Every structure is written in structure tokens, then in C-alpha cells.
Image (cartoon, helix red, strand yellow):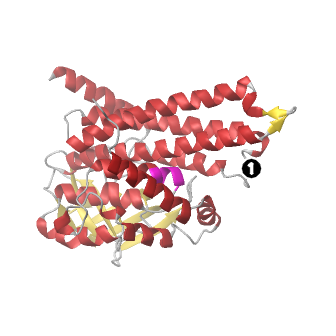
Amino acid sequence: MNFEFSDEQKLLKDQASGFLKENCPLVSVRDIVDDDALSYDKTLWAKIGEMGWTSTTIPEEYGGLGCSYLELSVIAEELGRSLAPTPFSSSVYLATEAINVAGSDQQKNTWLPKLATGEIIGCVAVAEAKGQITPASLATESNGSTLSGTKIPVADGDVADFSIVFVRANIGDGASAYIVDLTQSNVERESIRTLDPSRSQAKITFTDANCELLGKEGEGWSLLQKINNTAAVLFAWEQVGGSEHCLEMAKAYALDRIAFGRPIASYQAIKHKLANVYVKNTIAKSNCYYGAWALSTNDKELPVAAASARISAIQAYYFASKENIQVHGGMGFTWEFDCQFFYRRSKQLAVNIGSELVWQDKLISAIELDRAS
């Protein structure tokens, strides 16, 4: 079976790479990190919308390109490689996907055309406290027309125009999903500091905020698992893009840095570090291909494939970002060097939509379910 991308998808990858090299140098990431007033690169976001990336998987009838998840995977990898400081993942992988999957015709007509152009930004609000999230742990409640509660942290919640909010339900799977306009007066938002300021997070408080049911009452948890499986594959591609950039940075520095009369890349200790990073990256990318195939074909193996991609990509990105700093030696951990930004992003992405431990549990459960069927 050939998991490789097609020639057209490889061309898209080259175009995305060229665009981001020109429009998203690492100095733009540093600008966001250095300036507390900036949450994301608005100029880059507008250009991404013009490129049509935000509309990749949205059906043509709602103003999208109607492409597959394979094209979106290609874009995700390049966004991860460049560390693009935008709300792309929250708006495209999660909010857009939720409406695509569970929205009524009216909801799709209302939200998808604006999401397709990047005119509006969406996010998903689930977490409320520390620890693993379950339907029983949700305290946010709704009476069907309004909802109240607090969500923290919410990725890109400080810049989003609307959110898909998951609340406790007394029927079905124990949760329901609602669309909430975040610009209304009954919503209070507060930016919170995290390890990676280039990807903003927020605390959102809802006080009888107007809301609209997404999907059916009591089917929110099933919807969340479905969109998280999709997002897991796409986040994994982002992480692989970042881990490969780390390897490229470490290799370039090792070839250039001279110690005792020769490049440090010639020393066995450095060779072993780079080789170990390459092995983990290769394993993660193999799992990403598996995930992209299962996602694009809607195969029954998607839960296993998504968890496999997610776990291996988390491990590979963290290891690559850490070893990149080590190869750079005494200067690698300083503020002036860019190694820090990949380490920050690796740690941030590792907890989006659930930690590695959460996805390990998901993988075990998916394998057991598959064997039992």
C-alpha cells in the first residue's frame, strides 16, 4: 500500500513551504513572544485566508475548496515547520470540523462561508480544571438557550469570534455541544500566560450567554471524540513538521560549529544525537501517513491510527526540540537563539486535545475494541 502523497499534494507542499518561508520567518514568532499585546500574526492570517487554506476541507457549496484531509495534512506539516503564530488549528481542525460534522444546514450556511475566508475565527472550549476531562467533570450547564460556566484554558479563546462549548447533559453520552458568539456582553475573556505565547490561551466565563445547540442533545461527547481524532492526525503533522525543522537546525549548526579544529558534526556524540532524532521523526511520520490515510478514507482504524500518530508525534517533537538545544550547546538555551521557540511549541502542542497519557489510554481502548469486534 502506498501512503505517499500524490504529485499534486507534493506541489502544494512546496508552494506552502515557499509561502511560509517568505511570510513567516522566525522573527515574526519572536515578535509575538516579545509583545504581550500581540496574540497572533494578523497579517499572516489574512494571507492564509487569501491562499484558501482555511477553506481546504469545507464543501464547495459553503464556499470551500472541497479538498481532502490529505491536502490539509500537507498544509499542517508546513505550518508546524514554520511555527506559524496563527489560530489555524483551533479554527480549522476543531471549530470548522465540528460544524462540518454536526451542524444543521442553517448553521453551515451561517458559519462555514466566513470560516472559509478566514473572516471569522472559531475555537473549542472543553477544559475547566486540572485532570482528565470526562462528561462527569463538566460543570458548565445550559438550559437550551443560554449557558453558564467557566472554561480554561481555551486555545485562541481570546481572539476567536465564536466557540463550540461543551456542557454537561443529563441524557445520552453525558455532554452536549453549543455554538456561542464570544462577542456578546455575557461573555468575559481573559488572556492567560503559557509556555508558548505565540499560541494564545484564554479563560472564558459565560454568564447566561446566548447559545445554539450543535447536533443533538446528549451527543456532545461523541462529537468531541470524532473531531479530536481528526485534530490528532493534523496536530501530529504539525508536530512532525516542527521536529524535522529541529533536526535541520541542529544539523546545520553542527556542520558550521568548529571545535578543536573540525566541525562538531564529525564527533560521534553529535552524530548519535542527530541519528536518534531522525529515527524518532521517521517513526512519527510513518504513523502520520497511517493517520492521514485512515482519516481521508474514514476507515474504521481511525481511532487507532489517530492515537498512534498523536503519541509518536508528541514524543518525536519533544525529543527533537530538546536535542536541538543540546547540539547548540551553551548558546542553545539563550534568549537570542531560536531553539527555544520549537521547545515551547512542542510542549504546548503536547497538551492540546489531551496529553500523551490520555492518548495512550485511547490507543489501548481502541486496540481492545478492535480485537473484540
Quarter of the rendering containing residue 184? bottom left
Residue 46 vertical placement versus 84 (above, below): below
Quarter of the rendering containing residue 269? top right
Where in the figure is residue 9, as x and y percent of width and height? 35, 49
| Residue nearer the viewer, 215 or 48 | 48
Residue range highlighted in magenta: 78-83
| Residue nearer the viewer, 166 or 319 | 319
Residue pictured at 46% horizontal, 52% vertical: 78
Does residue 66 appear to the left or right of 263 in the view shown?
left
Residue pictured at 13% horizontal, 63% vertical: 104
The crowd level at tag 1 (other Cα within 10 Å; few <14, some 14-19, many 20+) is few
Residue pictured at 38% horizontal, 31% vertical: 360
Q: Can I make out residue 45 in this image? A: yes
Q: Amino acid at mark 1?
A: Thr
Residue 315 vertical placement versus 147 (above, below): above
> What residue sits right under mark 1 in the picture?
334
Identity of the residue furthest to the bottom in this view: 185
| Residue nearer the viewer, 25 or 39 | 25
Where in the figure is residue 206, as x and y percent of width and height? 34, 67
Residue pictured at 53% horizontal, 65% vertical: 23
Specify the principal SS of the magenta part.
helix
Where in the figure is residue 242, as x and y percent of width and height? 52, 46
